[in-house]
Image: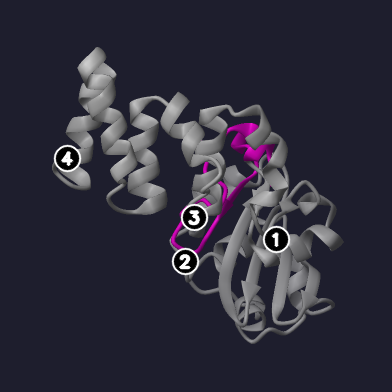
Amino acid sequence: MIFKSNLLKAATEGVDSKGSPDSDLGSKVVYNQDGVICYKVSDYKALMELSSNTDWVTKQEKHAIRDLESGPNYVVFKEGSPYLKYNPDEETLGQVLDPKNQPLNHPLRPLKYRHVTKDPVLASLGQEIPAFKKFRFITDFSSFALDLQKGNPTDLLNISLLMGERWPEAEPILLKKGDPISLYIYARDVIKGHWPEAVSTFLSRAKKNLTPGLSMAIKLYKRDIQSF
């Protein structure tokens, strides 16, 4: 894929291409600070070019055209390398993708947590660009004190997955009220290993009633984490 513009060159060199011929391609620099440059892209050729060194499907013409049908995309470079692509279209639920095409705000995450982020770049963009203002920057679990107080185990699991670390205050609630699959997921994706308290809970519940869900959670736990 070869374009006549210097758009990709400008992005990788961290240069503000505003006012250059690249603007004819339908891209506009809307943020350029501290090594982070954000393009608002409304033309498929520009989107293809900025996507070229990533796994984003928008490096292909048909996908670039489709992604822009509902409005512009935002492509962010950090220190000269692709960092994220954001399509604020409501149909995509405002998905943010890293260069490997993996969602930074997972589409399966409940809507109320979809725009909570630990990413400081998203937080910075949210201060300057209207399309990013919906993102809420958090640094620790204190932001979720109300969720902890409500004690909904599904919410507590999703918050832990979002934070990517153990939430000690939530674990007793998960063990007491969480369904078996949730305990398995917490061990696998948050603890990333054996969770003895979950195993004790499995065994205790199994003595009373070995439900299909509990049986499946035990099977998955033994297969993916540790046998017991």
Q: Main secondary structure of the magenta part?
A: loop
Q: Earlier in the sequence, mark 4 or mark 1?
A: 1
Q: How far, Cα to Cα, is label 4 from label 3? A: 22 Å
Count of labels shown? 4
Q: Nearer the viewer, mark 1 or mark 3?
A: 3
Q: Earlier in the sequence, mark 1 or mark 3?
A: 1
Circles 3 and 2, Cβ within 8 Å, touching? The answer is: no
- For numbered disc 1, what is the local secondary structure? helix
Residue 212, image x, y percentages? 23, 16
Q: Which residue is mark 1?
A: 122
Tell which of 173 and 45 is nearer to you. Answer: 173
Q: Which residue is mark 4?
A: 222
Q: Earlier in the sequence, mark 4 or mark 3?
A: 3
Whether residue 205 is situated above or below residue 30 in the rendered picture: above
Residue 110, image x, y percentages? 58, 33
The residue under the point 48% across, 57% down is 56
Which residues lie in the magenta part? 88-113
The residue under the point 51% across, 32% down is 173
Task: Inspect the image, locate mark 2, and give the three-letter code of the amino acid beneath it.
Answer: Thr
Q: Which residue is mark 2?
A: 54
Circles 4 and 3, Cβ within 8 Å, touching? The answer is: no
Q: Earlier in the sequence, mark 2 or mark 1?
A: 2
